Amino acid sequence: MSKKSLFKEIIQWIEAIVIAIVIAVLIRGLIFEPVIIDGSSMNNTLTDKDRVILSKINLTFNDIEIGDIVVLEIEAPNFKVLTFLNNYEWTKRLLPTASGTDYIKRVVAIGGDIIDIRNGYVYVNDIKLIEDYVKEDRATKAKFVEFPYTIPDGELFVLGDNRLHSTDSREFGSIGEDKILGTVSYRIWPISSFGKLQ
């Protein structure tokens, strides 16, 4: 093989690798990414170290509904080394960073709804929610937010399924839909629990 053809083949390999990296970054940033559950706030639906798929493209085509499991941004990610990238919001969406805080919770009320907590149960617009996914019966207790609570338009009220051990909208109030990173419908690990979530 001549030096010229060897150089051409190396360039082709570099091009293929760069294209593959760009495609992977776009898929992770715009379509879906794997997420590892950290903590017990969504027990028994999700447990610590479960792996799920975060769908970002769902937000483009579907409205968020009561019952959806979502990942929300609590603390924006920041780059610690290439700090100039922090000036561009799109880089934080596309590229992984070492910082940032996200929560995974369940949507229980949307903009315009009135949520109340009575005797350990959740009521939305005066209708008691049937929440078979909650870890313990009658476990929903009010915290810092005063109930009944009206959800502003464009915001969501989210709770963990493990109500006795969850930091959620009972403490920090409703959150803007723009803080939702995506929805979670499928668990991929452990294999024994692989499949669609309820």
Image (cartoon, helix red, strand yellow):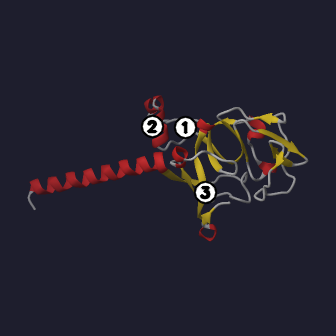
Residue 165: give x, y in percent of width and height: 78, 49
Circle 1 residues within 10 Å: few <14, some 14–19, many ≥20: many
3D distance between C-alphas at marks 2 and 3: 25 Å
- Mark 2, mark 3: which one is toward the viewer? 3
Numbered circle sitting on residue 91: 2
Circle 2 residues within 10 Å: few <14, some 14–19, many ≥20: some
Up the image or down, 87 lies above or below 95; here it is above
Image marks 2 and 1: residues in contact by CB distance under 8 Å: no
Residue 73: give x, y in percent of width and height: 61, 40
3D distance between C-alphas at marks 2 and 1: 10 Å
Q: Amino acid at mark 1?
A: Pro
Q: Quadrant of the N terminus?
A: bottom left
The residue identified by callout 3 is 185
**In-front residue for pair 105/124:** 124
Q: Left or right of 92: which side holds 18?
A: left
Q: Amino acid at mark 2?
A: Thr
Picture quadrant of residue 6: bottom left
Q: Left or right of 68: which side holds 85?
A: left
Residue 36: give x, y in percent of width and height: 59, 54
**In-front residue for pair 141/185:** 185
Q: Name the residue rendered at 85%, 56% in the picture.
A: 137
